[in-house]
Image (tube, helix red, strand yellow):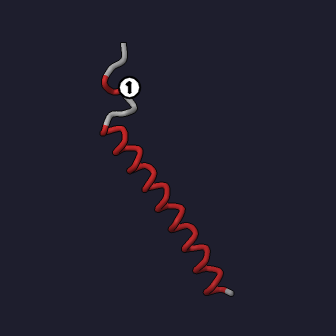
C-alpha cells in the first residue's frame, strides 16, 4: 500500500537529501568562516 513517493531508495529522495545536506553544510561553513574572520579582524 505504499505509493512511489514513500520509497526511501528513490533517486529523487536521495538527490533531495544530498541537496539538503549540502545546503546545511554550506550554511555551517559560512557561519564558521564569518566567525573566524571576525575574531581575526577584530582581534
The front one of 2 and 20 is 2
Q: Give above or below for 24 relative to 8.
A: below
Q: Is residue 21 left or right of residue 12?
A: right
Q: Position of residue 43 (x, y in %)?
A: 69, 87
Asked which secondary structure carries label 1, the reply is helix
Task: State which quadrant residue 38 falls in.
Answer: bottom right
Q: Residue at x 34, y 45 (%)?
A: 15
Q: Is residue 41 left or right of residue 12?
A: right
Q: Residue at x 36, y 12 (%)?
A: 1
Q: Is residue 6 left or right of residue 41?
A: left
Instruction: Tell me if mark 1 has few (under 14), some (14-19) or many (20+) residues whose alpha carbon lies within 10 angstroms of its own.
Output: few
The front one of 2 and 33 is 2
Q: Is residue 38 left or right of residue 10?
A: right
Residue holding disc 1? 6
Q: Give above or below for 25 relative to 3.
A: below
Q: Give above or below for 37 relative to 7.
A: below
Q: Position of residue 40 (x, y in %)?
A: 63, 85
Task: State which quadrant residue 39 falls in.
Answer: bottom right
The front one of 22 and 38 is 22
Q: Residue furthest right?
A: 43
Amino acid at each position: 500500500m505504499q505509493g512511489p513517493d514513500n520509497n526511501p531508495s528513490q533517486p529523487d529522495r536521495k538527490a533531495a537529501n544530498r541537496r539538503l545536506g549540502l545546503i546545511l553544510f554550506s550554511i555551517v561553513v559560512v557561519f564558521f568562516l564569518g566567525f573566524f574572520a571576525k575574531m581575526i579582524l577584530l582581534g
